[in-house]
Amino acid sequence: MATIKEDIAKGSAWRPRTLCDSSLNPLVPTVSGLGTVELRFSSVGPEVVFLKLKRKLLTDTNFRVGWKCALTYLRSVPNVRPMVLRCKDETGVDAFGGDEITLTLFADGTSSAEQFYEEAWDDADTDEILKLEGKVPEIAFVNFVEAQVYEADFIAEGPDTGRVPALSDADPLVKPVVVDISVQSGTYSFECTLARHRQI
């Protein structure tokens, strides 16, 4: 859901406003009035939405418009935090060979329908990374991204998980994230960048 909040100064000659689609057809009822006005619209997207605002005089520019959206984008930004799976400490004794790891990523749930990426890492050793930039699609989510890491040597065990929560109102527009995941006796970290906007 996107919320547009608009502050109109008293005495301004502002006309009704609404949200429109790309053909300028109204998406929500028209709203009039002075002071603070909010227009709300929900969509599964992707969709382009325009704010249509009519004013009586071209010289009347005393207004402020803000757009608040619940979406967080999972991204890989090299100068912020590139997306990788890092082996901090492989399972078992290092001398016995590397781990056989499968990484699976989910968005806002853990069903097969919410899975958007999977990759096998056949020989993961301590201090090595699996580079994910350019392979994992940039995806928008509302609540969380879950990273599941499965070590094939431990047949009886299920995958271990780590969650990347969506950005909160207190977070910056772009945020580096590192989530540690305990995998049996070892430790991995899923690293990425979160943003309020898509990469252009």
Image: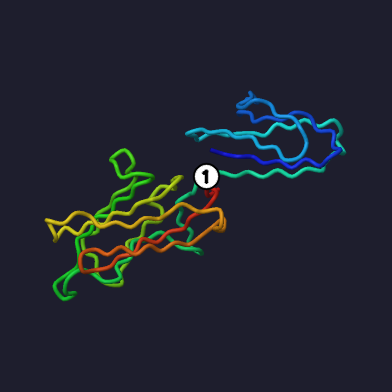
Decide: is 93 above or below 162.
below
Left/right placement of residue 3 relative to residue 57 reads left
Instruction: Using the image as rendered, state which of residue 193 and residue 199 is in the foreground.
Output: 193
Decide: is 194 above or below 64.
below
Which residue is depicted at the point 41% across and 53% down?
Answer: 134
Amino acid at circle 1: Ala
Q: What is the image's colouring?
A: rainbow
Q: Position of residue 72 (x, y in %)?
A: 49, 49
Instruction: Using the image as rendered, state which of residue 38 and residue 141 is in the foreground.
Output: 38
Decide: is 111 above or below 151.
above
Tally the marks. 1
- Could you say which quadrant of the image residue 174 lies in? bottom right
Name the residue beneath numbered marker 1: 70
- At numbered mark 1, what does the secondary structure look like: helix, strand or loop? loop
Residue furthest left as drawn: 156
Residue neighbourhood size for the residue with mark 1, other residues' Cα within 10 Å, grouped as few (<14), some (14–19), many (≥20): some
Q: Position of residue 32 (x, y in %)?
A: 74, 29
Left/right placement of residue 98 relative to residue 64 reads left
Left/right placement of residue 160 relative to residue 8 reads left
Left/right placement of residue 178 relative to residue 104 reads right
Decide: is 132 above or below 55.
below
Q: Position of residue 90 (x, y in %)?
A: 23, 69
Q: Position of residue 28 (x, y in %)?
A: 62, 27
